[in-house]
Amino acid sequence: MSLSFRGLNRLGKMALAAVTGRTNIHFLHIRKTGGTTIKHVLADHQVLARHVLHLHPHRVRLEDIPRGHKVMFVVRDPVTRFVSGFGSRLRQGAPAHLVPWTADEARAFAQFKDPESLALALDSAHPNHAAALHAMASITHIRASYWDWFGNEALLAEREDQIFFIGGIETFASDFAALKSALALPDSLVLPEDPMSTNRGAGAPGTSSRLGEEAVAQIRAWYQRDYDFLAFCDGWRQRHGGAVDSGRASGVPG
């Protein structure tokens, strides 16, 4: 059983879940982690036999989710996330969106034409270091940290038992298969490949995912706190035997 209920707002879906005993599951859309793809493929499957899905925009954080409800999200390595975020804003959100640069973003992209040059300038000895710091604080996607969505370690630990699914870009296909099984989604449901649905700009300027060793080292150092978050996610997946919390896949009302 799968109904879209696209016209039903969040409160309406939560009321439906309360009446029918379905589990509320909220998808947190972390920037540049495949969220556009997930939301596209699940858009027509938001009310299921045992679950109600809430597909949120970027601005919704863990603290916005009602206590007792479940959450799911996707993560990726900060290096490739940085490259993807740089390229997306360089294209001003194309192909799926059109979000013009801010004045600060325009200044940043006038200085840095590709992610490699920005990454290298994060070295404190680099002559463009000050401009790099400005760019990292100005470019929408790359200034975002995982902790923007999850607050801090204390909040994350407090609400760990509400996590239903942690997917990874690097294991996206198998993780999505596990999610389909847990939610009893149709076997025919597949991840889209077209650039509009996935919001990918393959081949566009600034989209190369290849960074040199020095650039990679600079990015890893910059996002060290995000790697701490990924360590938590890796531990969660190990404790739960994969991307889905199998103990919550049966549909505990919430």
Image (cartoon, helix red, strand yellow):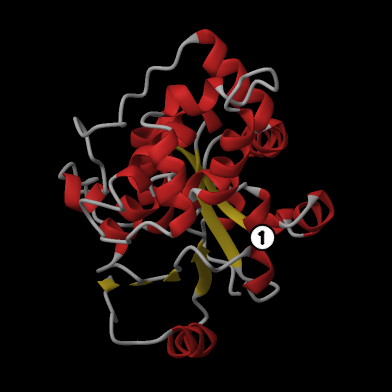
**Where residue 43 sits: x, y (%)?**
28, 67
The answer to whether residue 188 is above or below residue 121 is: below
Q: Would you identify the image quadrant in which residue 248 lies?
A: bottom right
The answer to whether residue 63 is above or below residue 182 is: below
**Where residue 247 sits: x, y (%)?**
61, 52
In the image, farthest residue toward the right? 154
Residue in the image at 31% along x and 52% along y: 92
Q: Which residue is mark 1?
A: 162
| Count of numbered badges drawn on the protein | 1
Residue in the image at 52% along x and 60% along y: 28
Q: Quadrant of the C terminus?
A: bottom right
Q: Quadrant of the N terminus?
A: bottom left
Q: Amino acid at mark 1?
A: Gln
* Residue placed most toward the observer, 25 or 107: 107
The answer to whether residue 58 is above or below residue 32 is: below
Residue 175 in view: no
The answer to whether residue 183 is above or below residue 141 is: below
**Where residue 233 sits: x, y (%)?**
64, 38
Residue 19 in view: yes
Q: Which secondary structure, mark 1?
A: helix
* Residue placed most toward the observer, 131 or 183: 131
Residue in the image at 49% along x and 89% along y: 11
Q: Is residue 165 left or right of residue 223?
A: left
In the image, farthest residue toward the front? 127
Q: Residues within 10 Å of mark 1 (few under 14, many from 20)?
A: some
